[in-house]
Every structure is written in C-alpha cells, then in structure tokens.
Amino acid sequence: VIPPPVIRIESYSEDSISFSLKMTTNIKVSGYVVNIYWTFDTHRQEKRTLIIEGEKSVQKVANLTAHTPYEISAWARTELGDSPLSFVHVVTSGTRPASPSLKAKAINQTAVECSWTGPRNVVYGIFYATSFLELYRSPHNTTTTSHNMTVLVQRDEQYLFLV
C-alpha cells in the first residue's frame, strides 16, 4: 500500500504559502501533483495545479489573497503508481481586501463595458455567464490589472458579471 504524502505548512503570509512534501515510505517517488483550491466570492471555486518533480520538495505559492482559506491537496507519483490524496487547510494572514464595486453597461448588442473600484497594482478576474449555474461551474473569464474592460458577448443573451 502506498501511503499519502505528508503536507506540512512551513510558513504563510498575506499573499503566499510555503509548504513541504515528503513520503513516509521507502517507495521511490518521481514527483507530486498539488492542487490549491480557494472559493471566490462564494460563487466560483478556483484552482491552481503544480506539477513537482523529485522526492522531497519545499514549494512557495505566491500571488494569493490576504485572509482567505486555501485547501492544498497532493498525491505522489511513485514507481508503484499514484498515492492516495492528502489535504491540509490554511488561511492566509492579513485583512481581506474589500470586494470591488462593479458597474456593467451595454455598449451595443455584443459588447459590455465593465468598470469597478478597488486597489491598484493587483490582478482582477472578470467572470461572466448567462446563468448562476454557469457562473459557478464554467464561466467565461479574463484577467486584467486595470479598472475597466470591454467584454465581448453573444447577442440576444442576458449575462451575469462578477469581478
């Protein structure tokens, strides 16, 4: 039986998490697959996947959001196959930034001008869909560092927007 890897949180800050991965077995490890999950505004679960080569690993994940719960899951790739998953949860320190205030205005039948308020020098994600279910499961999305963006949409549809 292949045991799951041990995930140990080494440190965390407002915008990063450092963690180590190791196996408690003599089975040869070729690498790890790590998923980092977080929920965006209760509507959208986000995920970042890391493919890590080698047996022991210390990783730092940056560009995270302050005071946000993150779930890290990992499994090891070994000479005998993949291990079971292991999980760890951590909340970044600091104060979570205020949600941006979004305004969306139709320019014509296929373009919507989105603008919002919020801090400078951060990356914003714009998510849009024709239903709440689609907004949660598989929205259209794009990112920008500015405070406005023109989004192209299908004509004769109503859209929900989230930034």
Image: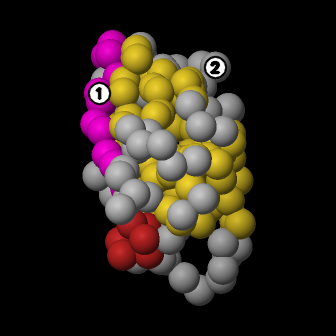
Residue 103: x percent and y percent? 49, 47
What is the CA distance from the residue labelled 2 to the residue labelled 1? Answer: 22 Å
Q: Judge whether 60 appears above or below 128 on screen.
A: above
Quarter assignment of residue 111 = bottom right
Residue drawn 66% across and 72% down? 153
The image position of residue 131, as x and y in percent, is 40, 76
Please tell me whether mark 1 sits on a helix, a strand or a loop: strand
Residue annotated with mark 2: 121
Instruction: Please tell me the numbered disc located at residue 134.
Output: none
Disc on res. 91: 1
**Image point 68% across, 59% down: which residue?**
151
Instruction: State left or right for residue 131 relative to residue 78.
Output: left
Q: Which residues are magenta?
A: 85-95
Q: How many marks?
A: 2
Q: Are marks 2 and 1 in contact (CB under 8 Å)?
A: no
Q: Specify few, some or many for label 2: CA neighbours under 10 Å numbering under 14, 14-19, or 20 or more.
A: few
Q: Residue lying at the far bottom in this picture: please name it.
A: 156
Q: Amino acid at mark 1?
A: Val
* Residue 155 in sight: yes
Q: The residue tagged with tag 2: helix, strand or loop?
A: loop
Task: Write the residue at 56% across / 31% down.
Answer: 56
Residues 1 and 51: in front is 1
From the viewer's side, name the closer residue of 70 and 128: 70
Mark 2 belongs to which amino acid? Answer: Asn
Residue 152 sits inside the magenta stretch: no
Among the two numbered marks 2 and 1 on one chain, the one whose residue lies closer to the N terminus: 1
Give the quadrant of residue 55.
top right
Magenta region includes residue 93: yes
Indicate whether 54 appears above or below 107: above
